Every structure is written in structure tokens, then in C-alpha cells.
Image (cartoon, rainbow, N blue to C red):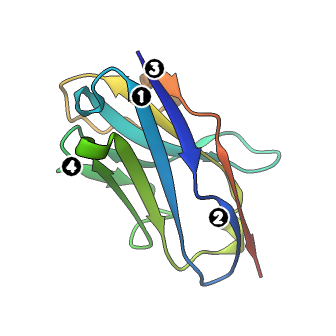
Amino acid sequence: QVQLVESGGGLVQAGGSLRLSCAASGRTFSTYVMGWFRQAPGKEREFVAHCSRGGTYTNYADSVKGRFTISRDNAKNTGYLQMNSLKPEDTAVYFCAAKFTSSSYARRRENEYDYWGQGTQVTVSS
């Protein structure tokens, strides 16, 4: 198993940047693919980005493509989500997720992940 803890959320003005971190503990992080999801008030949780085990293959939701970058440092057991050009509609609780697999298939659905963090709040003011 792996435990995930997100950090790095906060309040930022539109156009600003934040970097979220996802610290993993437990089983070897490099054996998991990683994803980021978000949930805005009153809305369902939605896919943001996916990253393969080695970080080579990435996949993004259309709404964040070109602005967000997912990455990971397996030596540090940490995943990241760099968020640039933030918009008020990016306001949400952001969750990282992981699945033990050797496949680099881009998992975009919640039920494709086995482990979740508790989330970190991102608020973008206009």
C-alpha cells in the first residue's frame, strides 16, 4: 500500500502560480502511476492530469492543458502539479491518486485509482 499527502495549496490571484506536492510513503512509489483530480464546490470530482511510473508519459484534461504540468521525483517519493496562469475556475480541492500497475495507459477515471490523499485547497481570486 501507499499513503499520499498533498501540500502546497493556498490562495492566489488569477494569473498566478502554485506548485502542489504529493508525498508518498509505504510501497515503492516508482511502482505506481499517479494522477491529480480536483473537486469544486457543488461539482463532481474531475480528472486533471496523469503521469506514468517513470514520468515519461503524461496526460491532461483539456481545461488545464498548456497551463499545468505533472511530474514526479521517484527518488524523493514525491509527485508534483505545477499550475500556471491560474483562473478562478481552477478553484477546488486538489487530490493526488495512485495505482499499482506497470501499464502507462492514461487513467482518467476515479475508479481506476486505488489510493487517494486527503486533498489540498486551491483558491484563485479574480
User: Marks 2 and 1: in contact by CB < 8 Å?
Assistant: no
How far is the residue under mark 2 from the one under mark 4?
A: 23 Å
Q: CA distance from mark 1 to mark 4?
A: 22 Å
Label located before the other in sequence (1 or 2):
1
- Compare marks 1 and 3 and give the one earlier in the sequence: 1
Residue that badge 3 annotates = 114
- Which residue carries the number 4 mark? 57
Rendered view: 107 above or below 8: above
Viewer-side label of 1, 4: 1
Cα distance between the residues tagged 1 and 3:
14 Å
- Tell me the amino acid under the disc marked 3: Asp
Residue 45: x, y in percent?
Answer: 64, 40
Quadrant in the rendering for residue 67: bottom left
Q: Earlier in the sequence, mark 4 or mark 3?
A: 4
Residue 5, numbered circle: none
Using the image, tell me which numbered label, if any, was put on residue 25: 1
Q: Nearer the viewer, mark 1 or mark 2?
A: 1
Circle on res. 90: 2
Residue found 57% across the figure and 33% down from its top? 117
- Residue type at tag 2: Asp
Mark 1–mark 4 CB contact (< 8 Å): no
In the depicted view, which residue is nearer to us: 24 or 99?
24
